[in-house]
Image (cartoon, rainbow, N blue to C red):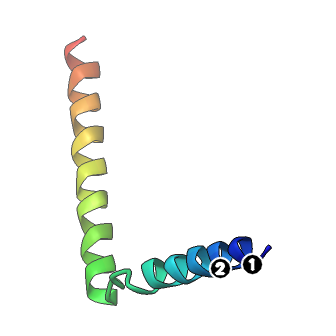
Amino acid sequence: MKKLSYLFIALFSLSLMTTSCREQKSTEDKVEDAVDDAGDAIEDAADDVGDAIDG
């Protein structure tokens, strides 16, 4: 029983350490990602329109 408790505590501690070390994105990074995604979506839509006109 004692070994099982130690194993549980060790796994719990490891999970806390790995989740607390994640890199947080700043608002500036989030905005930049959103702008990039919007630009990609516009390019895809323009390609689809071009294909529809050609087809």
Amino acid type for the residue under numbered disc 1? Lys
The furthest residue to the front: 2
In the image shown, does 42 or 11 lie closer to the viewer? Answer: 11
Residue 55 image point, x, y percent: 25, 11
Amino acid type for the residue under numbered disc 2? Tyr
Residue 9 image point, x, y percent: 64, 81
Look at the numbered discs 1 and 2 and tell me whether their residues touch, using CB distance below 8 Å.
yes
The furthest residue to the top: 55
Q: Residues within 10 Å of mark 2 (few under 14, many from 20)?
A: few
Per the rendering, the mark at residue 24 is none
- Tell me the residue at 45%/86% (across/down): 20
- In space, the residues marked 1 and 2 are separated at their CA atoms by 6 Å
In the image shown, does 44 or 11 lie closer to the viewer? Answer: 11
> Residue at label 1?
2
> Residue at label 2?
6
Tell me the element at label 1.
helix
Residue 30 image point, x, y percent: 33, 78
In the image shown, does 52 or 35 lie closer to the viewer? Answer: 35
- Tell me the residue at 27%/30% (across/down): 49
